[in-house]
Amino acid sequence: MTTAKRILVTSALPYANGPIHLGHLAGAYLPADIFVRFQRLKKRDIVFICGSDEHGVPITILADQQGVTPQVIVDRFHEMNKNAFTKAGISFDNYSRTSLPEHKALSQEFFLKLYEKGHLIEKSSLQFYSPKGQRFLPDRYVEGTCPNCGYDRARGDQCDKCGKWIDQTQLINPVSTIDRDTPVLKATKHWYMKLGDFQEMIEAWLDTKTDWKTNVLNYCRGWFKEGLRDRSVTRDLKWGVPVPIKGYEDKVLYVWFDAPIGYISSTREWAKKIGQPDRWKDYWLNKDTRLIHFIGKDNIVFHAIIWPAILMGHGDYVLPDSIPANEFLNLEGEKFSTSKNFAVWLDEYLEKFAPDPLRYTLAVNAPETKDADFSWKDFQARNNNELADILGNFINRGLTFINRNFNHQVPERGNLEAPDREILAKIHESRDTIARNLENFEVRKAVTEYMNLARLANKYFNDQEPWVNLKQNRAKCATTLNVCVQVSRALAVLGAPFIPFSSEKLWHILNLSGSVHQQNWDDVGKLEIPSGYQIGELQILFPKIEDEQIQPEIDKLQKILNRQKSGAISTSAPVVEKKESPVDDKISYDEFKKVELRVAQVLQVERIEGAKKLLKIQIDLGTEKRQIVAGLAEHFQPEELVGRKIVVVANLQPAILRGVESNGMLLAAESSDGKLSLVTVIDSTDNGAKIR
């Protein structure tokens, strides 16, 4: 339980280069909002801060592609995402943007502070340069093969497959993302932060965080084991925060440096908006503040190592108290892919469905300790079978019975029997259990406990049979319905963090004054609606979602998957056309050089359930082990392939076939009768040997 006088909550600043999808929402924004709404009901001093991250290469790349300025891009997506968050019930106290002059000034102030205290060092280094474009190529303007895992679409700052932070000069076969030309190395000067100087302090600080998630601590320990190295805080770009040092007028601050400072500049903007311009200091300069960063696991290094180092280097600001990083959310068993449009975009979702069913579905399946999955069928089932048939059903049955038989008035409570006392006691128990879970950032357990209360309330209503007692024992019937009203009030308040719109609607159905979000959490189970109180008109809280509403969404994603799989057909065994034909589509030698053929040994083979033609094959490439999927099941028994030395294309982009990742392509030939034979090498050839 928190004992801090004030709490400052942030969610990772989303890039303003595209819309928000459900993976983003589930990772950093919904869990934070649920936590914040709960803390507000606990009457704690809490501020919820976020904003658009409007600098960085992804934005300039998109601007180049569309022939507009970066400002046009960030203006478009800042407003789009801000509106989507609002409609989804994400209740930021302030949603700022890093392109504002106030943010730029604060970021420059941080840079100069670190510079003056000797935490920055100037270095000359080699960076990729485009002769054709006559410009340096910052990290994401360069792609190539990851030196760590072999992924062929690694960026010049990080490999999305293995998660390693890499230097662009380490990329194998680098290519400019602007013109697909091969860049050259050229000397350039930059300022670097001496992260290694902070390693001992950061390690000691993290050793005190015994209650943090193991995924965060283990990730950090991996970085410490390798040793923290100097990291550039400037880059050769024109879009961003200008470097405030003479001679660096053509450079800007690296986005990883200025983005987290956006938490502070957003808090300062909030303080000005409420007419208390110095109020931000209470949260950032006062050691009684509990600073909590909600992020996805891809942001752990920035928030748990680099950002604390910046704050330590500055010296005036509080350090993070908690960093509840969540794992990833998948979609229909596949990874979200913004580049392939394989996603459910939040703004598009909100045009068709209400926000609360989505909030509930994502909360009950939150990716807290491992990756989770969103499917449209599960979403439909959660709405229909739980929100509608459990929670909504209890509210509807109880209040309808009162309106019909007790003239819209809360019946008089008589003597309480054991079942009555048990359900009233359960209100207190659930209140405390939900609170304990939310304090520990365990949203899944909290929302499950909430639905269990509604489930128990349904059972109570059934067991008490008020429709029978209406004629046989009206006093007992009245007591049952009185208790149901009290449970309904509790469900309104306890549900407010998870389903805020529906809880507010229920509050007004009960004809209660004010807003459910102004209530006191600790009063749940204590304050009751009195007998004789007039109940409002009943409304359906959760309309059923029909198959015809869901199927178009499923079909849309399946079409994208089908296109993706048909385009990635080469990840299974390639087949030569049965009809012999001349080779017409010739490629250049330079194009052929990009194909990396290597020897691999088959370690293990198994069939893929439900896939008639596909085999899942584990291979040894010498320096690493991989998995590929190949269409060999109709031509070979799995045991026939084990031990063979085969030839694979090692630098293909991974693809998903039947929900299984395939990371490479094996070579095979097809005879005129349709029989496949593998391209193999002699057993003495080393695993990983290049085919020349």
Image: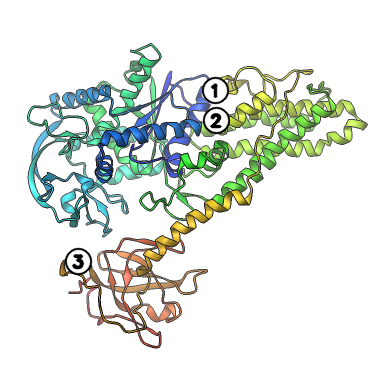
Which amino acid, by three-letter code, is at mark 3?
A: Glu
Q: Residue at x 42, y 20 (%)?
A: 6
Q: Secondary structure at mark 2?
A: loop
Q: Could you tell me if the residues under marks 3 and 1 are in contact, i.e. CB atoms within 8 Å?
A: no
**Extreme residue in the right direction:** 472
Which amino acid, by three-letter code, is at mark 2?
A: Pro
Which numbered marker is on residue 497?
2
- How many marks overall? 3
The x, y position of residue 255, in whole percent, is 25, 36
The image quarter containing residue 50 is top left
Which amino acid, by three-letter code, is at mark 1?
A: Leu
**Cα distance between the residues tagged 2 and 1:** 9 Å
**Cα distance between the residues tagged 2 and 3:** 55 Å
Q: Secondary structure at mark 3?
A: helix
Which residue was labeled with disc 3?
591
Q: Could you tell me if the residues under marks 2 and 1 are in contact, i.e. CB atoms within 8 Å?
A: yes
- Tell me if 410 is positioned left or right of 371 in this view: right
Q: Residue at x 28, y 51 (%)?
A: 159
The x, y position of residue 373, in whole percent, is 49, 50
- Tell me if 320 is positioned left or right of 480 in this view: left
Please determine whether, in this image, residue 609 is positioned above or below residue 529.
Answer: below
- Tell me if 364 is positioned left or right of 29 in this view: right
